[in-house]
Image (spheres, rainbow, N blue to C red):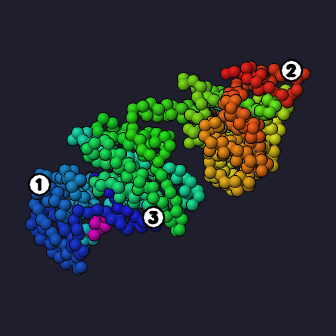
Amino acid sequence: MFRAGMNSPEHDLSQLKPSSRRSIEPGTVHVLLIDDSEDDYQLTREWLAAVPGTEYRIHWVRDFDEGLSAYATGAHDVCLVNDCLGEAEGLDWIAKRDLGACDIPILMLTDRGTRATDLKAMQSGVSDYLEKDLLNGPLLERAIRYGLEKHRLVKRLHSLSKTDTLTGIANRLSFQEMLAAGISSAARHNRKLALLYIDLDKFKDVNDSLGHGFGDQVLYQVARRLAEVVRTEDLVARLGGDEFALLLNDIVDPMSASVVAEKVLRALSAPFEYQGNQVTVSASLGIAIGDGRMSASQTFEAADMAMYEAKKRGRNQYCYFDGNMQAEAARRAQIESDLRLAISRGQLRLHYQPQVDASTGSVKAVEALVRWNHPTLGFLSPAEFIPLAESTQMICRIGDWVLAEGCRQLAQWQKVRPGLRLAVNISPRHLENKWFLDGVKQIITDSGVDPSSIELEITETTVMENPEEVVRKLQELNRFGVRFAIDDFGTGYSSLANLRQLPVRVLKLDRSFIWGIGVNPDDETIIVATIGIAASMGLELIAEGVETEQQAQFLRDNQCVNHQGYLYYKPLDSGQIQKGLLAISPAANQEQWPAQQARSTFTC
Ligand code: C2E
Ligand code: MG
Ligand code: MG
C-alpha cells in the first residue's frame, strides 16, 4: 500500500512526479525491441546511435515469449514491438502484458499497416503505430520521444486524479480503490483491516472566524499529523472538506485501531498556528473493521455511521461501528427522504407551549413547536428531524410553513385574546437564506397579524456564525415590528458585547440551568447573575423547562416571573389551546389565564 507524498498548501505539485521503479539515468533510454529480423535490429541500433545527446541502450529479443519476460523485469523505458512474428500477433501479445508489473509506452512497428490495425493498435493502448517502410532515424527518435513524453503526462494526470491537491495525500477516489483492493485481499487471506473515518469538529467555525486561508492551512497540517501516526504501509486520504480517512492494513486485533484513534485525537489536540493566529481543533472518528464480511462500500458506510455516532456522543472521541447503527442510519435515511413530502402531504403539526407570568398566572404567549405525524413511524420530535432538515434546504420550507401556520392560528386566537403573542423557532440555516427577510415579512403580512405579536427565537450560535449578516437581518425585521428572543441562552458562547448590538428583547434561559436549582449551586449562581444582567440591559428573561414548584419558587424569589415548562403546560395541540382560551369567561379578567386552573384543563 502506498502513502502519497505531501504538498505545501500553496499547491506545489512538483513533488507529485509519477513513481517509477527504475531510476532512469539522465540521457539514457532503455529500449526493449521485440523483432525477429536481425537487419531491423541493426538498423534501429544505427539510427538511435546517431541521436545526439541521448544514449539508447537496446535490449533485443526475437519472440513474444522472451519479450514478455523481458517486459516484466520493468528495466525498460520504452518498447518497440513488431506487429507480427511468424504466426503470432503483436496485438495478442499486448493484451497479455501484465500492466501491474510495468507500464511503459509501446510503439508498434509494421511491414504492412492498414487503417484498421492502426485503429486497433491505438485502442489497445499503443502509443504509436509506425510503418517500417516509411521510417527513418529522425522519425523513429521523434516517435520514441513523443511516446515517452505523452506517457509521462498521462501518468501525471492519473496521479493527480488520485491526489488531493490541497494536502497532497490520496483523495477519495484513490482511497476507495485502495479500500476495495484491501477488502478483497483481507477476504482472500483471512486477514483484517481497519478503516478510520475522521471528521473535524465544527471546522466551519474555523473558516468563518479565521478565514479560508487559515482553514486550508489547518487541513494541510491535519494531513501531515495524520501521516505521522500511521505506518508507511497504511493509507492516509482526504475524502473532501474536513473529512479524512485512514486505512490500516493487516491489523492483528480490531482493538489496535483504537490505539491509532487515540493517537489521532492526541495528534490533533495541539493547537494549529498560521500567521500568528492559533486555533484548536478536535475530531470525531468512526472505526469499521473489514474482514471480508462487508463489501468495501458497506465498510465505508459503516465507518461513516460510527463517526456520526461519535459526533452524537459529544465529539472529540472515536466509536466502533456496531449493527444497531445500521438500523438507526436506515431510519435517518427514511426520515430524510420522507421529509420532502411531509409538508405537501399535510403531515406536519404545530403544538403550542404557553409562556406563563408566574406572578399572575396569565399566559402572555405561546411557543410554536413543530411535530411530524409520520405515516409509519408515528409522531416524531423536532429534535430528530430538524437537524436532518437543516442538512438540506428543507428547513427553509419547514420554517416558512411553521411561521405561516402559527400566524394563521394566532390570527384566530387573537379574536378572543388580542394581546396573545406567538414565539417561533428560527433555524440558522433558514435565517441565512437569501429569501428569509422577504419571506418572513410576506407571511406575517398575509396573515394579517401585527408583526409586534411575533417573536422569533434564535440561538447564540446563529449570531456567532455570521454576526454582521445576522445583525443586519434582525435589525430590518425589527424595524418591521418583529421581536427577537435568544433561545437556550447560556449554552452558546455569545458575548454580551455581541448581544448589545442585536435588537433582542428576550433571553430564554436554558432549561439545563433551571434543572440545577436545588442541585447545583453553580447553576443557581449563573441564574441569579443572568437575571441581574438581563435586568440591567432592559431585557425580559424567560426561564425554560420549569418542572417543579421548588424551581418556580427559586425563580420567583429572584424576580424571574416569566416561566415556560411542564409545571404549567406541556406543548398542547391547537384544539387544547382553543379550549383554554374559550374557557376564560367573558366576565373574567381577559388578561388572566390561570395556570393552575388551566393545567388541569390542558393535561396532555
Ligand atoms: P426549544 O425551542 O428550546 O423548545 C423547548 C423544548 O423544550 C420543547 O421540546 C419543549 O417540549 C421542551 N420543554 C418545555 N418545557 C419542558 C420541561 O419542563 N421539561 C422538559 N424536559 N422539556 C420541556 P421540543 O418540542 O421537542 O423541541 C425541541 C427543540 O426543537 C426546540 O427547542 C427547538 O430548538 C426545536 N424546534 C421545535 N420546533 C421547531 C421549529 O418549528 N423550527 C425550528 N427551527 N426548530 C424547532
Ligand atoms: Mg424555542
Ligand atoms: Mg429553548
Instruction: Measure the alpha-carbon separation of dots 1 and 3.
Output: 48 Å
Closer to us: 9 or 231: 231
Q: Earlier in the sequence, mark 2 or mark 3?
A: 3
Closer to us: 281 or 215: 281
In the rendered structure, are the residues bearing label 2 and label 3 in contact, judged by CB atoms less than 8 Å apart? no
| Numbered tag placed on residue 9 in the rendering | 3
Give the residue type that dot 3 points to. Pro
In the rendering, at what x and y percent does residue 196 appear? 38, 46
Give the residue type that dot 1 points to. Asp
Instruction: Measure the alpha-carbon separation of dots 2 and 3.
Output: 72 Å
Residue drawn at (48%, 61%), measured in percent from left and top? 272
Q: Which region is colored magenta?
A: 145-154
In the rendering, at what x and y percent does residue 557 appear? 75, 38
| Numbered tag placed on residue 585 in the rendering | 2
Residue furthest toward the bottom? Answer: 52
**SS assignment for the magenta stretch, majority:** helix
| Numbered tag placed on residue 65 in the rendering | 1
**Does the magenta segment cover residue 463?**
no
Q: Earlier in the sequence, mark 1 or mark 2?
A: 1
